[in-house]
Image (cartoon, rainbow, N blue to C red):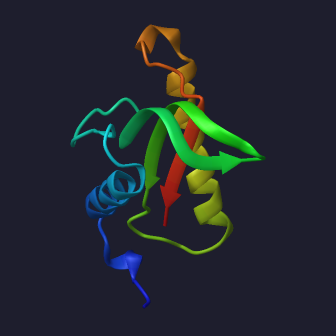
Amino acid sequence: MVYDFHKFSPQSFERFSQAMVSKKLGPGVQIYGAGPDGAREASFEGRLAISTHGSVWDGYVVVQAKHRASPRRGADDAAWLERELKADLDKFLDASRGLKKPEYYWRLQT
């Protein structure tokens, strides 16, 4: 089955991503609503059945979704995504914001 994510709005892609994350991670997922969300769509703290580089994820996970309403397909999209993710990651490094720094950062994008 093929899904055309380009027809999603940024908000509908965010909600779709939150639903997928809730299903994948299960109970304990914190979903954030519309408005200021501290650079998170969802978060989870604990041990997960996900591993990278042979190490199981165990700690604070932040999930971020990014959807460009008017994709251009190519280098411009990649540059846009890089700017967006860097801006969000910088929020966790700014101590004045009081955000807990994640051990794992899971991003979903179109």
Most extreme residue toward the bottom, as rendered?
A: 1
Identify the residue at horizontal 41%, vertical 35% (top origin): 44
Q: Nearer the viewer, residue 86 or 70?
A: 86
The residue at the far right in this view is 53
Q: How many marks?
A: 0
Residue 74 location, quadrant: bottom right
Residue 84 vs residue 60, the one in the foreground: 60
Q: Quadrant of residue 1?
A: bottom left
Which x, y percent locates residue 76? 62, 64
The percent coordinates of residue 71 (x first, y second) are 48, 71
Image height of 60 relative to 41, above or below: above
Residue 84 seen in render: no
What residue appears at the point 60 percent right and 38 percent down from the top-left corner? 57
On screen, residue 66 above or below 87: below
Residue 8 locus on image (x, y percent)? 31, 71
Residue 72 in view:
yes
Closest to the observer, 17 or 49 = 49
Task: Residue at 52% x, 42% y: name it.
Answer: 48
The relative height of residue 77 versus residue 63 in the rendered view (above or below) is below
Measured as percent of width and height from the top left, residue 27 is found at 31, 43
Direction left: furthest residue: 34
Q: Residue at x 36, y 41 (%)?
A: 42
In the image, is 52 to the left or to the right of 67? Answer: right
